[in-house]
Image (tube, rainbow, N blue to C red):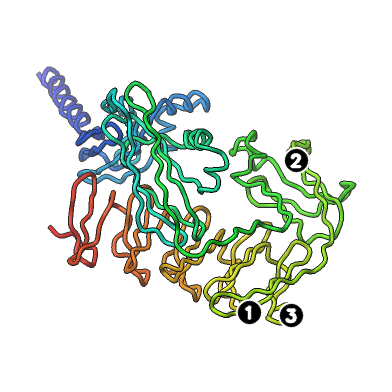
Amino acid sequence: MKKRLYIPTFLLLASIFGLRAQTDVPHVTVELIQTTPSTIIFNYHPNDACHHFYVYTDRGNEVALWSNIFGLTVDDVICIWGERIDTVSVWNSYWTDLIPNNQYHIYIVPYDSVGHRYPCERTRFSTPESGITGRSNILISSSFITDTSAYIVCVPNEETFCYYNGIIPADWFYKIGLDSVCRLVLNSSRLYETDRWGHLFLNRGTQYCAVALGQNGRGEFGDTTLHWFTTLGKKQIVEEDTAPVIFYNTNGADIDRIPEEQWNQYAVRAYVADKSRTVQEVSLGQGNIILATLPVSDYYVDIVRKSDENEVKELQVSIRKEDMTKERHIEEDGFVWTKMRQDYNYAIGDASGKALTPFIFTKLSYSNGVFIGKTHLDNRLYDVLLTPQGKYIINTDRHYDKIMYDSYSKNLYVSKSGKVGVCDMNGREIVKPSYDDILDMETYYKVLQKGLWGCIDATGKIIFPPKYQDFERTDSGYTVIKDGVKGYLDLTGKEIQ
């Protein structure tokens, strides 16, 4: 009797625990909220058994491609490349810059509370078609034009499937012609919806042309739109670097044939003429060879593969002695100084021609009571800021790639590793150089990061971080757009319900 009762009892317990095991399997549901030809909004809904998950969005077939190349499973690729999300009840995601009429994948690898990984979940969706068969036309407008910056907006019409845009100085436009300009613009990324972009570090008093051209649903190009604007201030001649500098960086055409992931396997070396001695060496892509301070002689600069010391590329450079030259300047504010040059480098001189600094600057200019110079540190070139007496306000330890005075705001735009910020004339960082773009709105700054806008006040205080598609300030606060929905913030950046 006991034996007959034992068997069904065991089966009953097994079924109960089996049911619980099924309900305790981590799972993430993807809820599609909104889709346009180039954007998508969706929510992740993890169940109670999901402790955290990794998510990766594949806009092509790269997951399968890299899985095959590296011999990894798809789950491994997602956990290496994907973003870890510690679960909440709902997690919102917003994709932009998608291609119309194209299929995309969302990969999710869930984990339970003890760290056990469960099989990858995949969701597919397609963006709707865009562009009709009529003539594509792009409307371009400009605003917030200062001495050195401008804000450009490009709006495609409903006939447009995709379009391309760019900006070029008028002098170059007339020199190379419209056909060549269009070919350059077509090398830029394809766009599908309204594009808002700010240009920093433009030249003063210079005319520019913003160019856009689009294709309709059949792939036919419409009319090319040209929008002309001129920056404020007095036009200045842009001075090139005078020091012999061999640029082997991420933008160097000389190293295009070497994949970036292999750069650490190569060195850039400067040798004396008979190659018996190395005078400078940097890793490929990590610095520049700067020969300005070397003695008069002939030098070789080579890219060398470290493993076998084989030469990949060679360049010969000659360093020759130059006589000192002095050029007296009288600035608009009445300041008088002497620009001194010797051996490819500049120094600041006083009104009588006496040098106030060493000859260490490859560029040197005066703006509103300060000098902006370019000099080198550890085989890299950086911009510095100096007083009229040649004393440092901003030294090379800031690692600013560029400093530019903005007469509109009376501040300095600075860039570092491709990111931009703002400093005052005393060198204090108002906005750290950590943003993709900055627009000076007089009483506050609009900062762009990963395609989203935030707000920083004139003192450098963050009102709200970059998390909105756009925003405008009103007398009572801010009107913001997030996930395509309009919202409102008070003057402190707090959401108004």
Q: Which mark is residue 336?
A: 1
| Relative horizontal placement of residue 55, taking residue 495 as reference (left or right) | right
User: Looking at the image, do the residues carrying marks 1 and 2 touch, with CB atoms under 8 Å apart?
Assistant: no
Q: Amino acid at mark 1?
A: Val
Q: Which mark is residue 354?
A: 3
User: Looking at the image, do the residues carrying marks 3 and 2 touch, with CB atoms under 8 Å apart?
Assistant: no
From the viewer's side, name the closer residue of 240 and 302. Answer: 240
The CA distance from mark 3 to mark 1 is 12 Å
Q: Position of residue 436 (x, y in %)?
A: 43, 53
Residue plotted at (65% across, 39% down): 255
Note whether 319 is above or below 302 in the view shown. below
Note whether 37 is above or below 265 in the view shown. above
- Determine whether the residue tagged by mark 3 lies in a helix, strand or loop: loop
| Relative horizontal placement of residue 238, taking residue 315 as reference (left or right) | left
Q: Nearer the viewer, mark 3 or mark 1?
A: 1
Q: Which residue position holds label 2? A: 304
Note whether 435 is above or below 40 in the view shown. below
Q: Position of residue 15 (x, y in %)?
A: 16, 24
> Quick one: quadrant of the N terminus?
top left
Q: Amino acid at mark 3?
A: Lys
The CA distance from mark 3 to mark 2 is 43 Å
| Relative horizontal placement of residue 154, taking residue 189 as reference (left or right) | left
